[in-house]
Amino acid sequence: MSIQKLIKSTFLVCFLSIFLFSSCYGPSYPKEDLNKSLSELIFKETGVVPSVFIVGRTIYLDIEIDGLLSMDQAQLSEAFKKLQISASDIVRVVLSSDADIKFMVINAFSADKSLLLQLAQDIDDFKQYYYMNISQEDYQTRTILTTTLNSVYVEEILNDRHDWTLDEFVGQLIVANVGLAFMANPFLAEIIVPYRPYFYKVENGVLFAKTKVDKMDVQTSQLLRNSFYAQGLEFTKKYAANIKSIILAAYNGKVLFGVDLE
């Protein structure tokens, strides 16, 4: 099992128990005190002081966790435990609040900000899974889990707090799952790693993704085209998102290829 699937599966078990508990009671966390309540809960249970921001219908949880880059297994396990508790707490608070929250974004980062682990979900997807409208496998594909290993990009992500749109969420899902699609085959994964795509933006029905390279061989280009097309069709249909095409470009702006979803 990949680390991505392990994290998603672990969080899912926690989220289910929390939702079962919270659905039996009325709002426990009024929207007026949501930031304060979540911050206090996480500090009480982990000893870590988080930053909580609500922008429109999007809630951000930024949390610095020591040990994410540790070679010591005990420290790494402790870091993962704090992340798990923090993720459980945000779900507990959101599901037990009268606040109108659509998207949940967790940014867990190392002390030097050289690593960022981002977990994002549409709260409605969790509810759909709980009520058995979608399968566990489908639900897990709807969870965005990405890593960033560059302090400059980490800072940019942490400073960019805005209200997510459905198209942006779907665009993030498409790009994240394009990368994961190759993980099942270690040979394909090795080929794709240098060309890993990153979400950039969705504008006027076009999903823009970027990659660090500005040259790509025919074989790799075709593999990525096929994956973008498959993931694009799948998620735009699931969410009825307004994404008609996809463009992959290098960071210097050079367009590598485009994919039409219509």
Image (cartoon, rainbow, N blue to C red):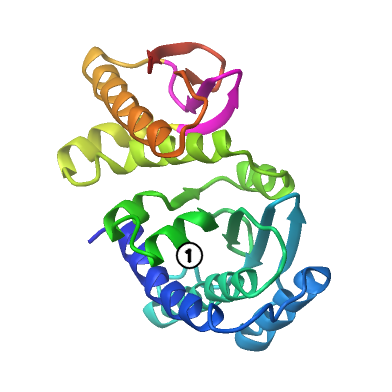
Q: What type of secondary structure mainly makes up the magenta span?
A: strand
Residue 144, relative to residue 44: is it above or below?
A: above
The residue at 83%/69% (across/down) is 32
Residue 262, relative to residue 241: is it above or below?
A: above
Residue 115 in percent (x, y) is at: 54, 55
Side of 152 where 30 appears, left or right: right
The residue at 41%/41% (across/down) is 176
Image quadrant containing the N terminus: bottom left
Name which residue type carries label 1: Leu
Residue 247 in percent (x, y) is at: 46, 17
Magenta highlight on residue 203? yes
Side of 54 where 171 appears, left or right: left
Residue 120 visible (yes or no): no
The stretch of residues the image draws in magenta is 198-214
Query: For the residue labelled by badge 1, is the local secondary structure a helix, a strand or a loop?
Result: loop
In the image shown, does 253 or 120 lie closer to the viewer?
Answer: 120
Residue 69 in percent (x, y) is at: 48, 65
Residue 251 in percent (x, y) is at: 54, 22
Residue 154 visible (yes or no): yes
Image quadrant containing the C terminus: top left
Side of 235 where 154 appears, left or right: right
Residue extending furthest toward the right: 32
Mark 1, residue position = 69
Decide: few, some or many residues near mark 1? Use Cα within 10 Å; few <14, some 14-19, many ≥20.
Answer: some
In the image shown, does 150 or 15 lie closer to the viewer?
Answer: 15
Quadrant in the picture for residue 175: top left
Magenta highlight on residue 207? yes
The residue at 56%/15% (across/down) is 253
The residue at 66%/57% (across/down) is 101
Residue 101, relative to residue 156: is it above or below?
A: below
